[in-house]
Image (cartoon, rainbow, N blue to C red):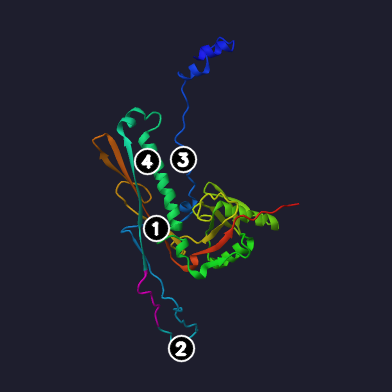
Amino acid sequence: MANEEAKKDGINALGAKAAYNLANVTKTKPQYGALTPKWLTKFLEFKGLETGIYRVNKVKEGETPLDVLCSQTKKSDIIPQGYVEYETEPREYVLNSISTIVNVNTAIEDVYSAPYDQVQEQLGLAIESLRERQESQLINNDDYGLLKNIADSQRIQTRNGAPTPDDLDELITKVWKEPSFFLAHPRAIAAFERECTKRGVPPVVVNIAGGTFLTWRGIPIIPTDKLLVDGLKNPKSQSGKTNILLIRTGEAKRGVVGLFQAGLKNEHSRGLSVRFRGIDDKGVASYLLSLYCSAAILADDAIAVLEDVEVGEYYDYD
């Protein structure tokens, strides 16, 4: 067929369609376009648990520090006495599981595992999907999600809708004790860049952990599509509203910590278990993947949110 086509064109030569059958084709691994860098789980400090429960003990609200004596001579002064009262019913965080099952026909595995191992590729894609879901749950989960657990005193509104430098400065006043990073949807970051350009104060760019990020007041602005715009990861509308978070992370800093189950059986990576479930009568091998995660806010001032951030403000420049 290929030679006949070549002859019609007046060329007596081997055609491309025929040659293709004998050629070694360079193939790639499966490309999963929905995957993201998942910077939140890389920047957030994680704490491994032994029993799947994390209790956050706090000082009772409204209690003041102990009175202390500042004196050169103790003989003539009475040392103040007392103690610090704790909350009697502290919050306990219980790890949630995110699970899926991967099935692979063993005949397919036997015949088609060159150059790529079919099982490993399937497991790898499933694991990435679980990690994507984990990041989303850390932000949006109804029980432990960061957005749902921010104190009312740590919520502020934008001044005019679009995220301005003044708005982010106001956010810093809420998390002023060693803030770690801002967290925002890429559309919100672009909107902030436009506001900075309008005012002639372009943000500084830094390289951290292999990524390039904008900063404001020296604090990196980390992108994630899990902070939704009008409830969507990829809104089609030019406008829309979202939130921007400012987070202090780390147990030692009384910040926000991610939680995972340590020492899992069949542990693949942090908080993730991969178990072989066996092969059924039809020759289908089955694998159970379970990811255990949660998050805890150790102090109210560890996180704050800028709400109702408009991402659709644009300007014309002379």
Q: Position of residue 284 (x, y in %)?
A: 29, 36
In the picture of the structure, the residue carrying the numbered disc 3 is 32
* Cα–Cα span, label 3 and label 2: 72 Å
Numbered disc 3: secondary structure: loop
* Cα–Cα span, label 3 and label 4: 13 Å
Question: Which region shows up in magenta?
Answer: 82-90
Q: Nearer the viewer, mark 2 or mark 4?
A: 4
Q: Position of residue 185 (x, y in %)?
A: 54, 53
Does residue 6 belong to the magenta stretch? no
Marks 3 and 2, the one that precedes in the sequence: 3
* Cα–Cα span, label 2 and label 4: 70 Å
In the picture of the structure, the residue carrying the numbered disc 2 is 77
Q: Nearer the viewer, mark 3 or mark 2?
A: 3
Numbered disc 2: secondary structure: loop
In the picture of the structure, the residue carrying the numbered disc 1 is 294
Marks 4 and 1, the one that precedes in the sequence: 4
In the picture of the structure, the residue carrying the numbered disc 4 is 123
Q: Is residue 70 above or below residue 39?
A: below
Q: Nearer the viewer, residue 107 or 201?
A: 107
Name the amino acid, label 1.
Ser
Name the amino acid, label 3.
Tyr
Q: Nearer the viewer, mark 3 or mark 1?
A: 3
Q: Position of residue 235 (x, y in %)?
A: 54, 50
